[in-house]
């Protein structure tokens, strides 16, 4: 979202101002990196809010294009139903260490890789006074539980992803605290701290069409919860806005009132607020009219008298028994101190809200009001005036006490001692303030592991280097591969994706919304040169493909830069001496053949004259002459092909002509395979649910094909011609966005959009000789030894270079049957108490690990 920049103006002598150079092809020098604020640049600062909102809309459009469906299909509902079925198949959210998956074809273990220090977006949070714990909901659909000082973060819903969370409340007025969540079209509650979840009843109509736009708890001692819902009236065929309420802590809801948007304005002109701790009244704004809701009775109590065309919001506070209400109408703030009977216009906040929960007032000071957009505004005088808590770019110089950009929610609350505090949710984690946002503290510096990655790439020659493109947490890099969950360095802020390399990660290309960048040494710095799209990018993050041999070149799919029709491939060249990136438009217009835009493309590694491209309208083209000419393939055959949106295309390393296409699979098969370069295609979706496949990769012999999908990781076993879920209790239920096979370590690495990077490492079969040098999973083939195998009463394990820290032995069901803590490089383990069968030996040094399969005689 944001290119990181900081306006550097140094006044020397009397009035000499050094201006920052204009944003052009090279935005940063090679050595600049965060968090040092003097090494960042800021330009066009006044356009930040407008640019941010444009990018947010473009991002949402891009996401929806990827999830292409038939008109009567709702991809979010389809995916959530799949997640719920997966939850029913899981026994609990406990994790075993060894997994046997895919009908017994895969054996290995899942491991979280990071990041541990780059939190993603937190959308809502609440505080449980009974346990002194924070519950924080991430944009990726995982709920975390932690301490009020920002420590001990633990995911409590890794087994059940709750997509689209907008509200979370911990209701602890009984002996059994309840976690209540409003998310998308559903509400859920859990009475056992997140282990099991039940769907609230009474709001079934919204699941067909619509959305829960806001939720609020009114005086939690009375157990009342209200919902503001966007629905559809199928009788009169019009959009309606409804309020639902529950009197049993969210177990069930009843409809209170409905309004037609034709008479009462769009959903953005409706909002409500309720005091969480006292009173019996919900305050509801409808355009500029204000109502009070008590029980199931609604009554208008005032009118602000302001014209509204865009957005209306309301918030309030009740300090010392005195009600103060605030309203937002098209960026103007209004105040009422007489129960909404009259209103005073106070100030223009000069921004739109980031989300519905971004407007709040303090529980301790009726004049303290907060409004979150890209930055967060703070007023301590009832919005007679206001100031920024900090500028978004201040974060990079002081991460611990400056807010990250983008404020989904500001949440006042009382702690266990009755002290008023405030949570601030951002795109970079969760913050807290105890002085009405005069100061803030970052609670997500370590352990709130909700990184949102679009893409992950591992440097093959030096696999300790892992690169990641994140949602609003920039381009990230890990440089030390330890046994722990890794910390990542954010080299530059913003949104980055489509990481490609012609030399396996020594150098690198990637895209940001607006430009492509090249880093000649990907292990350091951020980039050497970059070049703006200038209208060429047809997607928010347009697809890239590496050049087969030349590292300083890359190919990008785009459209006509002059605004005309067309779908083209551009060859980009990094000119290090000229400090720029040049664009060369290849002559072939693919849109003229198919009518679509290129959504993914690649080449055959067996003959780089052969290129393959997927289109956004369900078609496919191929070239046999290095993209000079294109031919229409046969992927568009079939009655529902036009609902297929290609997201990933894979050309086999094992068989020339084999191509696999993957993408949206809600109203049609989501994966297809061709054995003749795309001339003819067959469905390849047996075992795969209706969902979107973001990316595919495979082992060198195509025996295993891996898919990163909206509803989890999948593997296609060629021997069985079937897709299998790789989900288990050891891996989070998440949106898996990227996948790569790392052959040296026999590991498949997934990037998720909410829980960071996860590896599945394969167990290797040991030789049945007395002494075995095991082909272990970390790629250190000569460092670990396990012998004899098969073994009868004793087993010797050895690490050649480092002292063994721990050895675990698991049975075939993943249960620990022995655990040893050696004091040297070699140790002997007694197996006489074990029954005959198959076991797994997991060896740990301080920095490496290996897992081996043995037979006990």
Image (cartoon, rainbow, N blue to C red):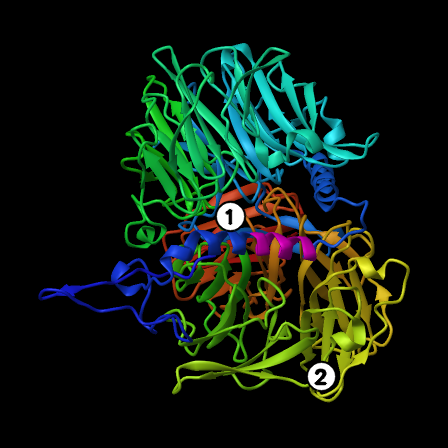
Looking at the rendered image, the disc whose residue lies closer to the viewer, 2 or 1, is 2
**Which residues are the magenta region?**
57-65
Q: Tell me if mark 1 has few (under 14), some (14-19) or many (20+) residues whose alpha carbon lies within 10 angstroms of its own.
A: some
In three-dimensional space, the C-alpha distance between marks 2 and 1, rounded to whole angstroms, equals 58 Å
Q: Nearer the viewer, residue 384 or 421?
A: 384
Where residue 309 appears, as percent x and y from the top left, is: 57, 39
Q: Nearer the viewer, residue 528 or 732?
A: 528
Residue at image location 60% in from the left, 60% down from the top:
738
Q: Residue at label 1?
A: 808
Give the residue furthest to the left. 13
Secondary structure under tag 1 reads: strand
Location of residue 653 by image quarter? bottom right
Q: Compared with residue 535, is residue 5 higher up or lower down, i.e. above or below?
A: above
In the image, taking residue 315 as reference, residue 285 lies left or right, namely right
Is residue 62 one of those drawn in magenta? yes
Image location of residue 363, percent across then percent down: 37, 21
Write down the residue under mark 2: 588
Question: Which one is in front, 47 or 677?
Answer: 47
């Amino acid at each position: 979202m944001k290119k990181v920049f900081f306006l550097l103006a140094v006044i020397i002598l009397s009035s000499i101002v050094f201006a920052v150079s204009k944003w052009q092809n090279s935005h940063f020098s090679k050595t600049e990196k965060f968090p040092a604020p003097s090494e960042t640049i800021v330009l066009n600062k006044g356009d930040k809010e407008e640019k941010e909102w444009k990018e947010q809309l473009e991002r949402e459009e891009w996401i929806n294009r990827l999830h292409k469906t038939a008109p009567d299909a709702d991809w979010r509902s389809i995916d959530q139903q799949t997640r719920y079925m997966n939850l029913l198949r899981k026994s609990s959210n406990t994790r075993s260490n060894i997994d046997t998956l895919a009908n017994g074809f895969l054996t290995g273990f899942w491991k979280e890789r990071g990041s541990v220090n780059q939190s993603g977006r937190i959308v809502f949070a609440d505080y449980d006074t009974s346990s002194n714990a924070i519950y924080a909901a991430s944009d990726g659909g995982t709920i975390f539980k932690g301490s009020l000082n920002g420590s001990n973060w633990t995911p409590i819903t890794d087994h059940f992803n709750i997509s689209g969370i907008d509200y979370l409340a911990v209701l602890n007025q009984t002996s059994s605290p309840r976690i209540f969540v409003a998310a998308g079209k559903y509400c859920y509650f859990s009475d056992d701290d997140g282990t099991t979840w039940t769907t609230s009843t009474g709001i079934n109509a919204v699941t067909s069409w619509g959305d829960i736009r806001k939720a609020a708890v009114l005086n939690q001692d009375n157990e009342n919860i209200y919902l503001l819902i966007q629905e559809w009236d199928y009788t009169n065929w019009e959009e309606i806005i409804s309020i639902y309420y529950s009197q049993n802590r969210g177990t069930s809801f009843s409809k209170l009132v409905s309004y037609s948007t034709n008479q009462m304005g769009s959903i953005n002109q409706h909002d409500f607020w309720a005091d969480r701790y006292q009173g019996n009244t919900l305050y509801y704004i409808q355009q500029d009219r204000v109502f009070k809701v008590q029980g199931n009775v609604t009554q208008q109590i005032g009118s602000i008298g302001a014209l509204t065309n865009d957005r209306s919001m309301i918030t309030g506070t009740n300090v010392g028994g005195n009600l103060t209400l605030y309203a937002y109408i098209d960026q103007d703030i209004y105040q009422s101190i007489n129960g909404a009977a009259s209103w005073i216009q106070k100030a223009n906040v000069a921004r739109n809200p980031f989300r519905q929960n971004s407007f709040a007032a303090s529980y301790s000071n009726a004049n303290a009001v907060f409004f979150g957009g890209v930055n967060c505004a703070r007023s301590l005088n009832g919005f007679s005036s206001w100031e920024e808590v900090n500028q978004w770019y201040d974060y990079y110089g002081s991460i611990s006490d400056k807010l990250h950009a983008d404020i989904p929610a500001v949440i006042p609350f009382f702690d266990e001692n009755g002290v008023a505090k405030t949570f601030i949710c951002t795109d970079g984690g969760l913050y807290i303030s105890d002085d009405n946002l005069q100061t803030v503290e970052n609670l997500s510096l370590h352990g709130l592991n909700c990184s949102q990655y679009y893409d992950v790439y591992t440097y093959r020659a030096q696999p300790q280097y892992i690169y990641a493109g994140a949602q609003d947490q920039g381009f990230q890099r890990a440089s030390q591969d330890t046994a722990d969950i890794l910390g990542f360095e954010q080299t530059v802020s913003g949104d980055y994706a489509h990481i490609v390399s012609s030399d396996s990660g020594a150098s690198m290309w990637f895209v940001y919304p607006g430009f492509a960048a090249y880093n000649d040494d990907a292990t350091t710095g951020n980039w050497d040169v970059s070049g703006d799209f200038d209208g060429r990018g047809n997607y928010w993050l347009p697809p890239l493909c590496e050049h087969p041999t030349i590292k300083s070149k890359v190919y990008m799919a785009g459209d006509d830069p002059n605004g005309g029709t067309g779908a083209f491939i551009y060859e980009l060249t990094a000119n290090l001496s000229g400090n720029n990136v040049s664009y060369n438009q290849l002559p072939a217009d693919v849109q003229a053949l198919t009518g679509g835009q290129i959504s993914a493309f690649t080449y055959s590694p067996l003959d780089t004259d052969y290129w393959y491209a997927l289109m956004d309208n369900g078609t496919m083209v191929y070239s046999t002459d290095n993209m000079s000419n294109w031919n229409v393939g046969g992927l568009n055959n079939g009655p529902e092909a036009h609902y297929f949106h290609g997201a990933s295309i894979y050309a086999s390393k094992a068989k020339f002509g084999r191509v696999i296409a993957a993408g949206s699979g809600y109203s049609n098969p989501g994966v297809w395979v061709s054995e003749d370069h795309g001339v003819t295609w067959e469905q390849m979706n047996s075992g795969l649910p209706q969902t979107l496949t973001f990316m595919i990769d495979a082992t060198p012999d195509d025996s295993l094909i891996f898919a990163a999908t909206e509803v989890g990781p999948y593997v296609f076993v060629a021997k069985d011609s079937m897709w299998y879920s790789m989900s288990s209790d050891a891996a989070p239920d998440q949106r898996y966005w990227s996948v790569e096979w790392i052959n040296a370590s026999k590991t498949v690495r997934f990037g998720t959009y909410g829980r960071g990077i996860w590896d599945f490492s394969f167990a290797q079969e040991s030789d049945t000789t007395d002494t075995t040098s095991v082909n272990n999973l970390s790629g250190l083939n000569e460092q670990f030894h396990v012998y004899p195998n098969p073994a009868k009463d004793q087993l010797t394990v050895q690490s050649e270079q480092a002292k063994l820290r721990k050895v675990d032995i698991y049975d075939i069901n993943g249960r620990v049957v022995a655990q040893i803590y050696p004091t040297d490089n070699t140790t002997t383990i007694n197996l006489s108490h074990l029954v005959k069968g198959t076991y797994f030996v997991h060896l740990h040094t301080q920095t490496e690990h290996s897992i081996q399969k043995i037979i006990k005689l």
